[in-house]
Image (spheres, rainbow, N blue to C red):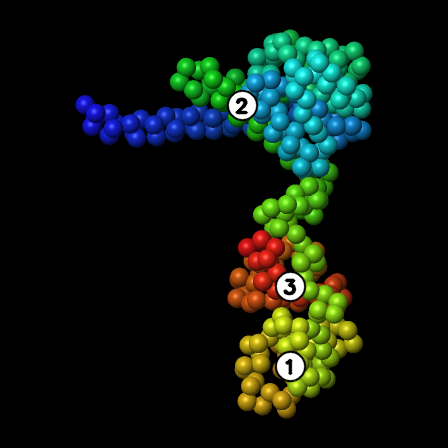
């Protein structure tokens, strides 16, 4: 009997997992097809706001609300979370008349939100509600309503917040992304809010990691190779940028040296250099530079400006040290 229980358990749990995921996936498709009518108006409201998006909820809605607020804040929309219970004990003072309140309650009857609702009505603070009950107290009081479609919870008893929290979270992501696109929020902006860790490293630009100034191995096209080798060796990056009147005309790599080793010293830098080198602009993301290096199987790239003037050299070791790879 124990053997039967053991053998059947994996099948039962995987079936349960698939059922949950399919139930929630179907609900997400339903939300996409039945996007709340006020969605665009809420985006416009937030774009025009002078203050922050203040998000609040209690229980699971509160946990989801914290994530929505964090996503908004990290993608260019100022936001903070106010705990619904703490709001009634002084934290209402965190909300100004320039703010917008985004209140979350699946039932729309959460008692802990009453003081927040009253506060927004008293001071004419715009209030957006997310709920699956359009006729609820919260939704009736709201200026804008983001109604979730009717969809069953994914748990076996149909009561634990599962599908509803997934829908709320996804709707928050949809808001954040729509606002990003309307603001023209770029990768460079994203890095400002994510300077640390792996993500921060990947969002760094080439200009922030490259060798420039006196560290740049730079020679004129007419420079004899004896002097060029000294420049390459002293800078230790394995390449030299070759210029004529300040503009890049070629790059010498260790591979170029090996290919012309037999009569190397009889040539100038311009004669040895690859006249069609791979270069990158200063604004390129470090992660994109790494992709170029991996694709072309090279260890270093010359960084140029809009007029093809060398600005620096980015080496794969720089990317490794920064945590990009």
Q: Is residue 155 left or right of residue 124?
A: left
Q: Which mark is residue 128?
A: none
Q: Is residue 48 left or right of residue 181?
A: right
Q: Is residue 278 left or right of residue 29?
A: right
Question: Contact (CB < 8 A) between labels 1 and 2?
Answer: no
Circle 2 is placed at which residue position?
A: 165
Circle 3 is placed at which residue position?
A: 314
Residue 142 image offset from top left, x and y in percent: 69, 14
Residue 184 image offset from top left, x and y in percent: 72, 41
Pointer 1 or 2: first along the chain: 2
Circle 1 is placed at which residue position?
A: 229
The quadrant the N terminus occupies is top left
User: Is disc 3 placed on a helix, strand or loop?
Assistant: strand
Residue for point 55% across, 67% down: 298
61 lies above or below 221: above
Residue 280 image offset from top left, x and y in percent: 66, 62
Spatial CA span between label 3 and label 2 = 45 Å
């Amino acid at each position: 009997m124990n053997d039967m229980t053991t053998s059947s358990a994996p099948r039962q749990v995987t079936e349960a997992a698939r059922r949950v995921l399919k139930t929630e996936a179907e609900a997400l498709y339903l939300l996409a097809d039945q996007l709340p009518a006020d969605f665009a108006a809420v985006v416009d409201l937030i774009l025009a706001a002078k203050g922050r998006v203040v998000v609040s909820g209690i229980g699971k809605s509160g946990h989801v609300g914290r994530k929505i607020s964090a996503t908004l804040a990290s993608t260019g929309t100022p936001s903070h979370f106010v705990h619904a219970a703490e709001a009634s004990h002084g934290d209402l003072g965190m909300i100004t008349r320039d703010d917008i309140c985004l209140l979350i309650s699946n039932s729309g009857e959460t008692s802990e939100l009453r003081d927040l609702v009253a506060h927004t009505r008293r001071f004419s603070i715009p209030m957006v509600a997310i709920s699956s009950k359009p006729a609820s107290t919260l939704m009736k009081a709201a200026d804008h309503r983001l109604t979730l479609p009717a969809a069953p919870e994914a748990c076996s008893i149909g009561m634990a917040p599962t599908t509803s929290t997934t829908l709320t979270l996804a709707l928050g992501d949809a808001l954040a992304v729509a606002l990003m696109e309307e603001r023209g929020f770029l990768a460079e902006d994203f890095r400002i809010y994510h300077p640390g860790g792996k993500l921060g490293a990947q969002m760094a630009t080439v200009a922030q990691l490259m060798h420039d100034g006196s560290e740049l191995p730079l020679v004129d096209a007419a420079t004899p190779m004896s002097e060029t080798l000294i420049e390459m060796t002293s800078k230790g990056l394995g390449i030299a940028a070759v210029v004529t009147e300040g503009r890049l005309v070629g790059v010498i790599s260790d591979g170029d040296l090996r290919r012309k080793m037999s009569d190397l010293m009889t040539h100038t830098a311009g004669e040895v250099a690859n006249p069609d080198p791979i270069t990158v602009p200063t604004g390129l993301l470090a992660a994109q530079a790494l992709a170029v290096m991996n694709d072309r199987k090279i260890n270093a790239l010359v960084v140029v400006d809009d007029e093809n003037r060398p600005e620096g050299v980015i080496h794969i070791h720089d990317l490794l040290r920064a945590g990009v790879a």
